[in-house]
Image (spheres, rainbow, N blue to C red):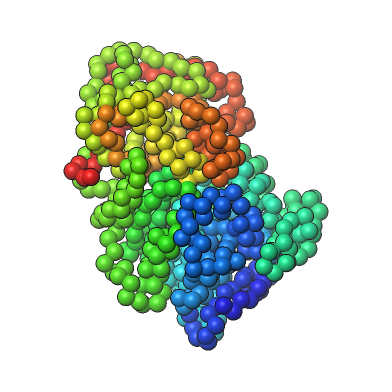
Amino acid sequence: MRIHWDVPIPMDDGIVLRADIFRPMTDGRYPAIMSYGPYAKGLAFQQGFKPAWDLMVAENPDVLAGSTNKYQNWEVVDPEKWVPDGYVVIRVDSRGAGRSRGILDMWSLRETQDFCQCIEWTAVQSWCSGKIGLNGISYYAMNQWWVAALKPPHLAAICAWEGAADYYRDVVRHGGILCEFLPYLGRVAVKTVQHGVGTRGKRSVVTGELVAGPETLSEEELARNRIDVEQWVHDHSLDDAEYRSRSAHWEKVEVPLLSAANWGGQGLHPRGNFEGFMRAASTQKWLEVHGGSHWAEFYTDYGVGLQKRFFGHFLKDENTGWDRQPPVQLKIRHVDRFVVRHENEWPLARTHWTKFYLNPTDRSFATQPLMAEAVLDYDAKGEGLTFVSPPLIEEIEITGPVAAKLWLSSSTSDADIFVVLRVFDPKGNEVTFHGSNDPRTPIGLGWLRASRRKLDPALTLLYRPYHAHDEIWPLSPRVPVELDIEIWPTCIVVPPQYRLGFSVRGKDYEYPGPDLNAIGASYGAAKGVGPFTHDDSKDRPADVFGGRNALHFDSDRQPFVLIPIIPGTR
């Protein structure tokens, strides 16, 4: 490869961003695969995120094959696997990060405008064919949704791999409840490589240059050069213009797209991938869904092969067979394996939307309602209530979005509700999976702050409640209100004699077993939800969220969960 380090890309306001460019040795004009983000293009995956790298390659040795892995970088493509196929690979340090100067403001409109200008700068270089594709995981997928709405003329295709799309609902506030992940991400993965960290940061194992330099600024200067994320999330509790500027505008996304989701990504990305496939204006769009850890499938032969077929078709006019690719490719999750299956739409047209009712008498979970009158209360910050079905007579497949309807009251003016769809084996042990960011992720999760229960009627669907989050509706103490709770899409084939379960909790799900600490987890402790926790004391003050909640049952109030049962499949 020909490698050009720290290539300057000027922006319209005078700021110069820096890019590393990997090109084929043979002269010519090639399509480009681009990424733009804040994690420092010079920081090797193995150097900056060693536990995740070691776990990934131990479980997926094909990641190592065909490459020296010298140029691996977190959440973006390996140039050694793309440049030989006739692509230019470009990594841009976003404004204020890595070796690019400026104010660091994650996912801001300014970043999106920069990204658009980088695309157009690349397209007119002498070595570029004029066709640009965007590829990458997480941050590098999310800002693809943003920039695609600006319609840069030379953007030819995007592959958003596990990328959230709604800054309010997917990232910052689940059901209106503040998620602690974004401030955490800022502390551990972004501030550490902010431009100006300089000699306090790491050096590239390839070039020896400072990954967050070359200059070293004081802590005070660094603080002035970035948005205070922790303050920002507390200042913006409702879905306002600031959130909208950092979210996808589906009606403007028209570029061909491949949206890749992870069943186990509860807490951040999968919602955006499903919404992107369903709502983007593009007439050429595909959905792929897999399981496992956050990074693995992007780097495996399975993932790279899928990406190359997609980009080969749209960037190089190759006969990759993509013109025959079904719209939906699912890795159907069984308790012990995944099985690839193709579909024509999402949600699946043949879905039997089945109501499973919560029974207050014996805490069962079944398709027949019980006309019982009851009030079940629980600690508003406690373990809550769990309802469990009888053993299943035959195998069932659950694939699709899930929704719950509850009637709930609080002893105070508000309540946070955490719901969990669960599966138990014949011995009563819970079935969990290695999720994208936690090794023991349950089947499905949902969240709602009761005062944010207002629905948007234009966007609410039978199977996907859509909350407006534009005003607060306080509760009157001990007066029940009707709640519709979105549970993010999931998939599981449940064998006979297993049981379904549903929990209504006052706090995040926790796996009922020993803490795995960081073993097999992406960030910190592994208790079932990874870093996607919701217990910020400012957001959940004890005088409001520390009382008692109650579920209400009577002839007019029969709480249920709407579950997508797929008939006739194995």
Going by the image, does 215 lie left or right of 424?
A: right
Quarter of the image holding residue 107? bottom right
Q: Residue at x 35, y 56 (%)?
A: 287
Q: Residue at x 39, y 28 (%)?
A: 429
Can you give x and y, in whole percent of width and height, for residue 416 in the image?
A: 49, 28
Going by the image, does 15 lie left or right of 434?
A: right
Q: Residue at x 50, y 18 (%)?
A: 379
Q: Residue at x 40, y 30 (%)?
A: 430
Q: Quarter holding the C terminus?
A: top left
Residue 494 seen in render:
yes
540 in relation to 411, above or below: below
Quarter of the image holding residue 74? bottom right
Going by the image, does 570 lie left or right of 279?
A: left
Can you give x and y, in whole percent of width and height, for residue 495 in the image?
A: 27, 35
430 in relation to 217, above or below: above
Can you give x and y, in whole percent of width and height, for residue 103 in the image?
A: 68, 58
477 in relation to 31, above or below: above
Residue 119 seen in render:
no
Going by the image, does 99 lie left or right of 520?
A: right
Which residue is at the front of the view, 325 or 58? 58
Which residue is at the front of the view, 434 or 370? 434
Which residue is at the front of the view, 240 or 100? 100
Residue that extends furthest to the left in the rendered view of this protein: 568
